[in-house]
């Protein structure tokens, strides 16, 4: 839960979400925090976190965060009710960038969906597909790295 | 791990390769650019180019991911797969620190970084990460068939 909260906050808070542009560092941080918290809980009962725990924490919290982030951003765009596509065209024009015909067709479709529904179902589904791949992968990286650090401690042995 | 790294790195190259294509190949390219846009700034002047398009990620990220892939391929020749001890933690911290210093000095206009510094620091981090993540991933499979770890301190307490 802690892991997901960190991933979500870093993903949705403006400026803070730039952290994710560094190889999804915010998502990795979420996985790290979740694994550290779980390890602290396990310590109380005399157990130590394992790699499968770290990976599972990262994957599950990543999956949950991906869904919540997409739902949140979609709801936000519905509340704001502003079509971002004209702004994208303006930026491209300023930079003298010409869009390929299929990209222009795609943006027009998204723009129409924004005008009609207040959000784009196509963009939402694509974002969901992307986030469901990225968040669990980088979450698991964070979880595994944490267990690598914790696992360096030598005071562990197998239960008899 | 090798499969994930291969698919990931293939995407970095396929994005520019199929950028001018229409239909399915063009959509795959667009999907990869979209996927990587969540993990990297993709700035044109900080990216390597291929087929007159930028790669899926910036030059630093490219070297992180390809360094990681190279290390995963080389790993079995350097260390035995069942020998899952990890390098010293300072190696990970130093390699991550190099990236942070290179990016930080550039961000605060102290020293401008170059393609070379970004690629070297990124490449080192990618290689080092593999030596921390691969043993952990291998150990996950062992953990499913082994009893849970317990701390020595707790064993001592329970034996008293």
Image: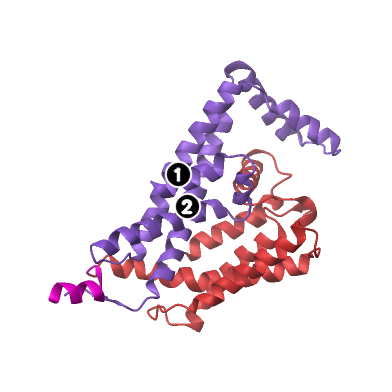
Chain colours: A purple, B red
The image quarter in which residue B34 lies? top right
Secondary structure beneath label 1: helix
Pointer 1 residue: A5
Discs 1 and 2 lie in a common subunit: yes
Pointer 2 residue: A30
- Closest to the observer, B20 or A71: A71
Residue farthest toward the left in the current orientation of the protein: B160
Q: Looking at the picture, does residue A129 appear above or below residue B59?
A: above
Q: Distance between the residues labelled 1 and 2?
A: 8 Å
On the rendered image, what quadrant is the C terminus of chain A found in? bottom left
Residue farthest toward the top in the current orientation of the protein: A116
Q: Looking at the picture, does residue A126 appear above or below residue B39?
A: above
N-terminal of the pair, mark 1 or mark 2, is 1
Number of numbered discs on residues? 2
Left or right of A45 on screen, residue A144: right
| Residue that appears at 67% across and 30% down | A106
Question: Could you tell me residue A12's position as x and y percent?
Answer: 56, 39
Question: Could you tell me residue B13's position as x and y percent?
Answer: 66, 57
Q: Does the stretch in magenta take in B157? A: yes
| Residue that appears at 47% across and 52% down | A30
The image quarter in which residue A54 lies? bottom left
Residue extent of the magenta highlight: B147-160
The chain ID associated with circle 1 is A
Q: Looking at the picture, does residue B118 appear above or below residue A118?
A: below
- Closest to the observer, B133 or B89: B89
> Can you tell which mark lies on residue A20?
none
The image quarter in which residue B64 lies? bottom right
- Closest to the observer, A61 or A88: A61
Q: Does the stretch in magenta take in B8? A: no
Q: Are marks 1 and 2 in contact (CB under 8 Å)?
A: yes
Classify 10 Å Cα crowding around label 2: few (below 14), some (14-19), many (20 and above).
Answer: many
């Amino acid at each position: 839960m802690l892991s997901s909260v960190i991933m979500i906050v870093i993903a949705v808070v403006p400026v803070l979400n730039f952290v994710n542009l560094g190889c999804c560092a915010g998502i990795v941080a979420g996985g790290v925090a979740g694994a550290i918290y779980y390890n602290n809980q396990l310590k109380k009962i005399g157990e130590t976190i394992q790699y499968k725990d770290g990976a599972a924490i990262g994957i599950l919290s990543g999956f949950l965060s991906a869904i919540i982030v997409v739902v949140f951003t979609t709801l936000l765009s519905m509340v704001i009710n502003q079509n971002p596509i004209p702004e994208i065209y303006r930026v491209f024009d300023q930079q003298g960038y010409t869009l390929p015909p299929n990209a222009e067709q795609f943006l027009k479709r998204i723009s129409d969906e924004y005008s009609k529904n207040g959000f784009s179902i196509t963009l939402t589904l694509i974002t969901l597909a992307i986030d469901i791949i990225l968040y669990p992968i980088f979450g698991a990286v964070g979880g595994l790295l944490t267990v690598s650090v914790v696992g360096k401690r030598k005071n562990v042995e197998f239960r008899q | 791990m090798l499969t994930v790294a291969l698919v990931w790195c293939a995407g970095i190259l396929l994005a520019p390769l199929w950028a001018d294509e229409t239909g399915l190949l063009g959509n795959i390219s667009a999907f990869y650019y979209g996927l990587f846009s969540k993990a990297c700034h993709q700035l044109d002047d900080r990216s390597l180019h291929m087929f007159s398009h930028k790669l899926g990620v910036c030059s630093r990220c490219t070297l992180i991911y390809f360094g990681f892939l190279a290390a995963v391929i080389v790993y079995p020749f350097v260390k035995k797969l069942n020998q899952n001890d990890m390098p010293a933690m300072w190696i990970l911290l130093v390699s991550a620190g190099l990236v942070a210093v290179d990016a930080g000095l550039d961000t605060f206009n102290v020293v401008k970084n170059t393609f070379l510094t970004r690629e070297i620091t990124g490449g080192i981090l990618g290689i080092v990460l593999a030596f921390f993540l691969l043993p952990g991933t291998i150990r996950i499979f062992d953990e499913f068939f082994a009893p849970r770890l317990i701390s020595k301190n707790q064993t001592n307490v329970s034996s008293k």
